[in-house]
Amino acid sequence: MVVWTVANQKGGVGKTTTTIALAGVLAEQGHRVLLVDTDPHASLSYYFGIESEDLDLSVYELFTQVSSREQILQTLCPTQYPNIDILPATMGLATLDRSLGNKGGMGLVLKKAVQKVAESYDYVLMDCPPVLGVLMVNALAAADRIIIPVQTEFLALKGLDRMIKTLEIMQGEQDTSFKYTIVPTMFDKRTKASILAFKKLQEVYTNKIWPGVIPIDTNFRNASFEQKVPSDFAANSRGTLAYKSLLNYLVKQSMQYKEVER
Amino acid sequence: MSKSLTASKKIMKNYLSELLTEPEVDVESVQQSVVKQTTSRPLAHKENQSLENLLKTVNEPKEAKVAKEVPVTKDVAKEVTNGNSSDTGLLPTSSEESLTAAITLPQKGYRQGDFQAMFFEVAGLTIAVPLIELGGIHKVNKTSSLMGKPDWFKGVMLYRDEKINVVDTALWVMPEKCDQALKDSLNYQYIIMLNDSSWGLMAEHLVDTVVLSQDEVKWLDSSEKRPWLAGLVKEKMCALLDVSALIELLNKGSDINQK
Ligand SMILES: Nc1ncnc2c1ncn2[C@@H]1O[C@H](COP(=O)(O)OP(=O)(O)OP(=O)(O)O)[C@@H](O)[C@H]1O
Ligand SMILES: [Mg+2]
């Protein structure tokens, strides 16, 4: 089992889209995928038609009670894709930071939880809220690799800087170093700003950045209306192809650093 | 300014340290203490559904293969670190095997539909590489040169535990044009890694990444004279590399003229 966490403290950069698109391609390739929604807005859960406020169990309960493997499996929701299951989020998650404060070790809850279902999945993809808090810390601590989508525009670069700093500080608290891959998203080849931002990213982050780009593609929004993963909705769209190429690169990177050999 | 930054960094550090350090008392008991009473029965039907799904994944032949796929990948990872290469459906082909694959199976990943290519520059020359065969990009660092190697073999660069064989791209691509003046003018900044091989091409500038359709490239399939050339990108009239063939040539120590 490999855990990839999609995170950026900046909102609207394509985190949820990236999580879903990668999950779709992985599932299509026959891998068993578990999605973990850690965003109280539950947009990932909602994407798959899950009304998480109607559920009795969600990621929230993992934080309030010790969960066995069976209990975690009960919390999972199936999706219309047989290879994709999801651990849904609820609004209640937003209260965690207040109720738990920074109780010792509470950053490791998700890591322990997914380890209990490791045999059932090949890939676990975690979607993060755009705020640094107990949820993002949990998702980061559980990750074998962190995927950081960043919009190809200058304001987003600033946010990226902050995100990397967070990782660096957090790294000091863990025994392993973080592996992360920056993914330029919403690239518009017709705008100069996009191209300039892309070049700047390459210059500053060279080997930490995927050399490709996720282009602007209206298929992403349309796919979400139909609650389909992009690779199912528009298999040969530019957006889907870009995510396929990203996945390829991530797998290569993971093998290089032997993340898959855990 | 910098003082407050340090202060905020400290706060962050404490916060994270707290969250990520196991307390003396087991976390699980802390969790117990904040238990929210879950009165209702967990969704029994959900449980069945997801169990059913899990069972499905075990039973169906397609999924059964899947279940094995992770161990396969593991083996590949081992082989890769041993310097060998292998091929799973998921991975782009590499070195030896890819050449045979290219003969028996001419359709490469980028030979259908749209694909992305990255353009880089060397001595005024623009070269494109299909993203799917790009292994990564490094900043140029100190290379230690080796004796008895061809001119174009710039040397070995260490990145973490990895040894990168660095190719002086200008010398490889246009040996006859490389006089001292040109050599002196080269300002290499990046190393473009070829697929999962340990070969990297030096580049002066990264230009951009472009989505190409099949007919935006003039394909030069099975060119015996220039196996390293997959085709020409029409708009920019620049070379699109056949990465696996190029790796093969580099492994043999051949230059562009296959000498
Ligand atoms: N490459 C793209 N081209 C066009 N639209 C996109 C692309 N990527 C994402 N979008 C759209 O942009 C919006 C924001 O994307 P998304 O929800 O993935 O971002 P996010 O980082 O998860 O946001 P948040 O921080 O709010 O969770 C969505 O409507 C999505 O459909
Ligand atoms: Mg989101």
Image: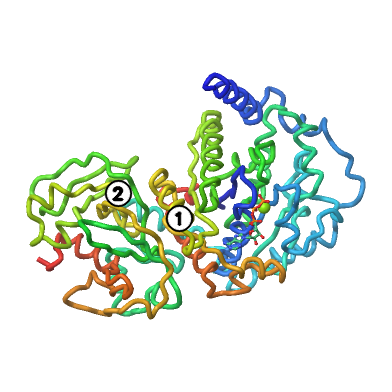
* Callouts 2 and 1 on one subunit: yes
Residue B52 marker: none
Dot 2 amino acid type: Tyr
Q: Is residue A124 visible?
A: no
Please state the horizontal and vertical placement of residue A70, each as a whole percent of the image. Answer: 75, 51
Task: Answer yes or no: is residue A30 visible.
Answer: yes
Within-10-Å neighbours for mark 1: few <14, some 14–19, many 20+: some
Residue lying farthest right?
B39
Q: Which quadrant of the render holds ligand 1?
A: bottom right
Q: Nearer the viewer, mark 2 or mark 1?
A: 2
- Residue sitting at the far top: B3
Q: Quadrant of the N terminus of chain B?
A: top right
Residue A12 horizontal side relative to residue B205, left or right: right
A233 lies above or below A139: below
Q: Between disc 2 and disc 1, whose residue precedes? A: 1
- Letter of the chain that mark 2 sits on in the rendering: B
Q: Position of residue A14 (x, y in %)?
A: 60, 55
Q: Which residue is mark 2?
A: B190
The CA distance from mark 2 to mark 1 is 30 Å
Q: Is residue B243 above or below residue A35?
A: below
Depth check: give the residue in front, B185 or A86: B185
| A252 sits to left or right of B145 | right
* Three-letter amino acid code of the residue under disc 1: Lys
Please state the horizontal and vertical placement of residue A157, each as a whole percent of the image: 51, 44
Side of A208 where B141 appears, left or right: left
Quadrant hosting residue B8? top right
In this rendering, position of residue B174 left or right of residue B35: left
